[in-house]
Amino acid sequence: MAGDQGVSYDLQTYPDRDMLAMDLANNLAGDLRSILTHEDRVVLAVPGGTSPGPVFDVLCAADLDWDRVDVMLTDERWVPEDSDRSNTRLIRERLLVDRAAKARLLPIYAPAHEPEEVLAEIEVQIANALPLAVVLLGMGTDMHTASIFPGADQLAEALDPHAPVLVAMRAPGAPEPRVTLSARVLNEAMRKHVLIFGDDKRKALENAQGKRLEDAPINAVLSGAIVHWAE
Ligand SMILES: O=C1O[C@H](COP(=O)(O)O)[C@@H](O)[C@H](O)[C@H]1O
């Protein structure tokens, strides 16, 4: 158990990224299978960015009732789906394939100039499927998770215990507007996993200990999570 001076989480380290991807995908599939024994449907929320692709490549072939699984993103960059920065594009290409093609995508992006134009509409579409059953989160070296960035314009709202489901975000380090699940919704998940690769992120995770949520938003979701790390 790590995080003695702050939030408490389990840290699982792996000899390499392939082993991590294999083991984490098996963990996620196992979580979903076990929750499906007592729920009709489950929601799996996953991150975008550069880290989760190899996990998706394994998870998409898992033997489980994918037709009872709703998949959604933890956050999205406000770019069209054909952009190579689109997290939706990533999960369509790497996760919602093979056996997982039977899962239902709950989109958190819709074509509109600004997220605020369609946010309420998107929230209605996903609200009925919540709470999340399983969430996989990523983290940046700036200690952001999902699109809850230090210094973001709506940071306080995304961290508020009574936050809405989705929050639109603009942050100094993010080239486009974002939409993110709030920390409240992420924390309602029955199982939480965090995926980090590399020494820089491991150091950032350690440095987050004891910091305020506003400076280290990752601390808002770490409690009870399993953090999976490989160099
Ligand atoms: O922009 C984002 O960043 C984080 C971390 O991404 P990575 O490329 O460093 O793995 C990711 O978790 C989030 O979903 C994404 O939108």
Image (spheres, rainbow, N blue to C red):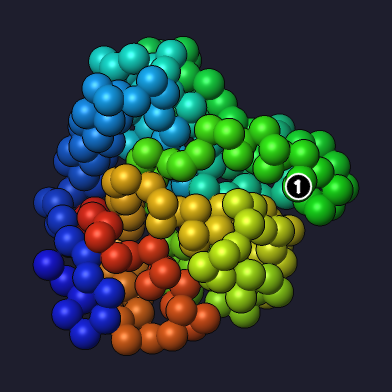
**Is residue 172 visible from the viewing direction of this image?**
yes
State which quadrant residue 221 falls in: bottom left
Query: What residue does disc 1 label?
Result: 119
Q: In front: 171, or 156?
A: 156
Q: Residue at x 27, y 25 (%)?
A: 38
Q: Residue at x 49, y 60 (%)?
A: 184
Q: Is residue 213 above or below residue 145?
A: below
Q: Is residue 106 above or below residue 135?
A: above
Circle 1 residues within 10 Å: few <14, some 14–19, many ≥20? some
Q: Is residue 71 left or right of residue 37?
A: right
- The residue type indicated by label 1 comes to Leu
Q: Residue at x 32, y 65 (%)?
A: 222
Name the secondary structure under disc 1. helix
**Residue 114 in the image: x percent, y percent?**
84, 52
Quarter of the picture containing the C terminus is bottom left
**Residue 111 in the image: x percent, y percent?**
81, 37
